[in-house]
Image (cartoon, helix red, strand yellow):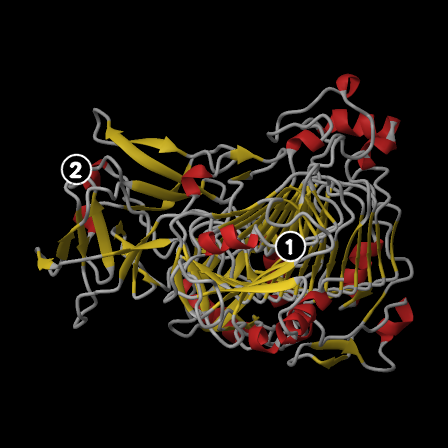
Amino acid sequence: MFKGIWFCSLILWMMPVSGQTQRIYISPSGNDSNPGTKEAPVATLHHAQQMWRKLDGTVQVVLRGGTYYLDSTLLLTPEDNADMNTFLFIMGYPGEEVVLSGAKPLKTSWEPWQRGVYRTAVPASVPSMDRLFINGEQQILARYPNYDSSARFYHGTAEDALSPARVKTWKQPVGAIVHALHRAEWGGYHYRITGVDEKGAPVLEGGWQNNRQMGLHPQYRFVENVIEELDAPREWYFDSAAHQLYYMPPTGGELPENVSYAVLKELIVIKGSHQRPVKQVILNNIIFTGTARTFMLTKEPLLRSDWTIYRGGALLIEGAEYCYIGNCKFDEVGGNAIFLNNYNRYVNVDSCHIYKAGASGIAVVGSPDAVRSPAFEYNQFVPYTKMDRTPGPQSENYPHYCDIKDNLIQYTGEVEKQSAGVQISMSSNITISHNTIHNVPRAGINVSEGTWGGHIIEYNDVYNTVLETGDHGAFNSWGRDRFWHPDRRVMDSATTADISLVTLDARDITVIHHNRFRCDHGWDIDLDDGSSNYRIYNNVCLNGGLKLREGFFRTVENNIIINNSFHPHVWFSNSGDVFRYNIVTSAYKPIGIQTWGKEVDYNFFPDKSSLKAAQANGTDVHSTYGDPQFMDFAAGDYRVKPGSKVLSTGFTNFPMDQFGVRIPRLKALAAPVPLPAELYAQQTAGKASLTWKGATVKNIEGLGERSATGLPDESGAYFVKVPAGSEAYKAGFRTGDVVIAVEGEKIRDTADFMSKFQEHAWKQSMQMTVFRNQRAMELKVAK
C-alpha cells in the first residue's frame, strides 16, 4: 500500500497550498525568525517542528539543498502526528541534495608537529572524538596495523597488535581501542584498554558484543586510538587531556579547513507506543550521515544466539504506524542505519541506499517482553514443566507487517562484524522484497529465532556475503525457540512426545522464494539450529549450497544449486522435511543423518554416482541425472532448455531477471554479481581440466604425469598451472602441486577434490595434504 505514498507526495507537491495542506520551508541559509515560506525559509528542523506542531492538517516540511548539522536528535512523537487523516511529510526539495549530519564543524588552526603530522588546538568543551571528517570524508583513526583496503579482515590485522612488546612503545595505552574477530569467527569483539598488567599485557574492558563468549581471535585483531601509531596519510588522533587534534594529510595534500567530528548517534527518532503511536510520517529524499560509532553500546543479548544489539540507528523508529521512509541515503553512518524497534505496524522502508553502515543496514527487532518463556544464551533453557505453552507472543511490543523493498544495501558492517544487511528478531510478517545486498561481513539477511515467523523473503539479490566471518549463510536463520534444548536427547524426547512445541514460537510459515544468493564462507541458504516452519522455492544458490540443520517442517522445492548441493545436518526423526524437484550439481553432503525426513525425491543430479550415493541412503527413488542443459550458464540464465531431463522430475523454470532492486539509479550503483564461470560437474568428468581460484586443475593421467609429480599412484587433483597473484597462489598452492587429501580424506581426482572442498567450504580454512617436490606436506588453506 505504501508504493503510492511517493506518488502522493508528488501530487501534494504540485497542489496549491490551501486548506488543510501547508508547507514549511527550511534552508541552511535561512533564519529561524523567518515565516518559513519558500522566499523566507527557517534555518533548522527543530524550529520548524515548533511551527508544524501548531498547525492542523497535512504538513509538508521542505528542506532546500545543503548540509544541516543537527545540534540534537530530532524527536518525533505523537504530538507531531497521531492522526490517520493527516500526513507529516519531511522531504528534500526535488532535485536538490539534502544532508542531515550528526557531526559538528570544528574550527582549526594547524601547525607542524613531527613526522609529517600537524596539530590544532580544540576547545575544552569537546570531551572526545570518535570519527573525524575532512570535506565530509571519513578519516582513519590512528591504528596498527595501517589501513589496507585490500585486507580481508578489518582492513588489516596483526597477531602482535596487543603484544607486550608493542604496548610498551605506547606512552598512553589507556583509551586505546581493540577490535578483533570472535575466536570461532562468529562476529567480532570490541574493547577499551583501561591499563597494563604486571606482565605488560593490556587490560581490556568490553567484549560484550558477542553472546557466545569464546575470546578474541589470536590473529585477526587491530588496535586504534594510539598516537604512536599515527604514521600514515589520513590518520588522526585526539588528545582529550591536552585538547589537541593531530592529523597527517595525504602526501602533497593541503591542510584541511572543512573539518567536523561525529557527535550524535541518532539523527531522527520516531517514538510512540502501542497505546499512542506516531502515524503517517513520511521521510523522503534525505541523506543521513556523520553519526558516531556505537560498538561499545552493543551489549543487549538477543534470544539464544551469538547476537547482542544496540537499539539505535541513524534513524530509530519505535511505536509507529503507517510510516514511510523512501528515497533516502544512509551514507557511512557509525552504527545501524535504520532500526525498527519494538511496536511498529505497517512501516515501510523503500528505495533507499545504505552505504558502509558501521553495523547493520536495517534491523527489525521486537522486545523480549513479547516472548513467552524467553532464554538469552545458547546453553540456557526454560524447563518444559515450567514453560508457557501458549502459542505466539504475549504482548504487541514487536514489529509486525512491515516492508523492506527495493533498497540497495552495500558494504555494511564496517565496524561491527556481527551484523547483517537486514536483521530480523522477535518480529512477525516482515516482507523483504527486491533488495540488492552485497559485500557484507556476515549474513545478507539474518532471521534470529522463530518468533514469530510469517516473513516473506522474495526477489532479493544477495551476494559477496560472509566475507569476514565463517560458518554462516547469505541467508541465515536459527530456531532456538521454546522447544530448543542444548541437550539433543532431551529435545528429541520432548518433540517426539509433543510435536506442537515446535510451532509455539515459529507460528507462521516463513517463505523464501525467487531470490539469488551467494555466500563466500558458508552456505547460500543456511537454516541452522532448529530453524522451523519454512517454505523455500524458486531460488538460485550460486556457490555455497543449501543447508537444513535440525528443525522441523521445511519444504524445499524447485531450487537451483550451482557448483554445490544439499547439506542436511542432524535431522530429527519426525522432522517432516521435504526436498524435491531441485537441481543439485554435486552429491548430497549429509552430516549425522539417520532419517531423511518426510520426502527426499524427484531431484536432478549431475551424474550417476551422486544419484546412486543418494539412493543408497534410501532417498531419490524417482530422481534422475545428466546434463541439465541450462539456457545460458555464463550469463546466469539457469532455466533449462525444452527437452531437458530436468523437466521430467517435476522441476519448472522460473524467471532469472527479477532479482534485486528495481530502481534504475540504485541498480547502477550495485557491484556486479560474481556468477560462476563454469559448472564444475561438467569440467571434472573424464580428462577435462577446470579452473579453480585462478589455477588450472586436472586429473593425473598416465605414467608421465605420475613420474613428473613423484606420486605413488594416479590419485589426486593436479595443479598444472598456478599463476602468481591468483587466489590459489595466495592460498598457498604452487604449480605442480597435487592435492591428495582434504581434511584427512583421500582425493582420487578433480571431481573428488571439488566434492570435498564444497563439503568443507563453510570453514574459514581447511587442512589439505599436498604432494610437492616429491613429498607430502600439510597446507592450511584459508578461504
Q: Quadrant of residue 69?
A: bottom left
Is residue 303 in view from this perspective?
A: yes
Residue 729: % across, % down: 41, 67
- In the rendered image, which quarter is residue 689 located in? bottom right
Is tag 1's residue or tag 2's residue first in the polypeptide sequence? 1
The amino acid type, in three-letter code, at marker 2 is Lys
Query: Residue 754 appears at what percent x and percent y?
Result: 61, 63
User: Label 2 neighbourhood size at 10 Å, few (<14), some (14-19), many (20+)?
Assistant: some
Residue shown at 85%/45% (left/top)? 597
In the picture, measured across the screen, residue 88 lies left or right of residue 611, that is left
Image quadrant in which the N terminus is located: bottom right
Which quadrant would residue 630 be assigned to in this image? bottom right
Q: Which mark is residue 168?
A: 2
Q: Which residue sits at x=39%, y=33%?
A: 206
The residue nearer to you, when weighing 88 against 225, is: 88
Residue in view at x 66 percent, y 74 percent: 15
User: Can residue 775 be seen?
Assistant: no
Callout 1: few (<14), some (14-19), or many (20+) C-alpha neighbours within 10 Å? few
Q: Nearer the viewer, residue 140 or 697?
A: 140
Q: Which mark is residue 351?
A: none
Q: Residue furthest top?
A: 385
Which circle marks residue 56 in the picture? 1
Residue located at (41% from left, 52% from top): 291
Helix, strand, or loop for circle 2? loop
Residue 467 coordinates in the image, percent (x, y): 50, 57
Q: Is residue 61 above or below residue 159?
A: below
